[in-house]
Image (spheres, grey):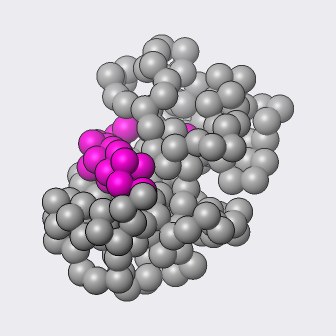
Amino acid sequence: MRGYQIMNIWIVNLKSNGLSTTDEMKADYIKSNTCGMGWRLNENITSKNEYLNKAVVTWPEEEKSLTLACNNYHKMAKNDLVLTRVATHYYIGIVADDKPFYDISNNICPNNISSWMRKVTWYLIGNQDVTPAPIVAQLSSRHQKTIDIRLPWNKVLYDFCKVVCNN
């Protein structure tokens, strides 16, 4: 995070396949410096279009949600910021790769069965008492989307992120 730049800030609800994603599974993303979405197909996928064509057949009732999540994971750019919550702890991350990857080996984040993933360098903000209220508010929804751009980029948030990330 060198110098004030315009970048996206993503709100990410870390998910594995299905609705039973636990806080322990979410913590694995933090430990492995990744973030990911659910709706995994157990086969090698080489492109976003190939994934979407197969995924909407597998989960027709989830077409809108999985398409939005997949498109957003592909819109993320290197150095974009990511905000997430695991249990009562809030995290900020910096996207560290140029494009998403599809990992069916489970070597990177073994306890998760995600589809598209991004490499993210995570930093602990802390609990609700030390996390700025706008971040807490954005991450408080129980029915939060898998991934969305939610916060406008501004100098105040940039300065806060710079302090948390120590650079």
Q: Which residues are magenta?
A: 62-83
| Residue drawn at (27%, 42%) of the image | 75
Magenta stretch: dominant SS?
helix
| Residue drawn at (35%, 83%) of the image | 42
Q: Which quadrant of the rendered structure holds the N terminus?
A: top left
| Residue 161 in sight | yes
Count of numbered badges drawn on the protein: 0
Residue sticking out furthest to the right? 129
Residue 94 magenta: no
Please state if 91 lies on the left or on the right of 103 as rendered. right
| Vertical position of residue 104 compared to residue 20: above or below | below
Residue sticking out furthest to the front? 61
Question: Where does residue 68 sit, x and y in percent of width and height?
Answer: 35, 45
Please state if 121 lies on the left or on the right of 76 as rendered. right
| Residue 90 in sight | no
Residue 78 magenta: yes
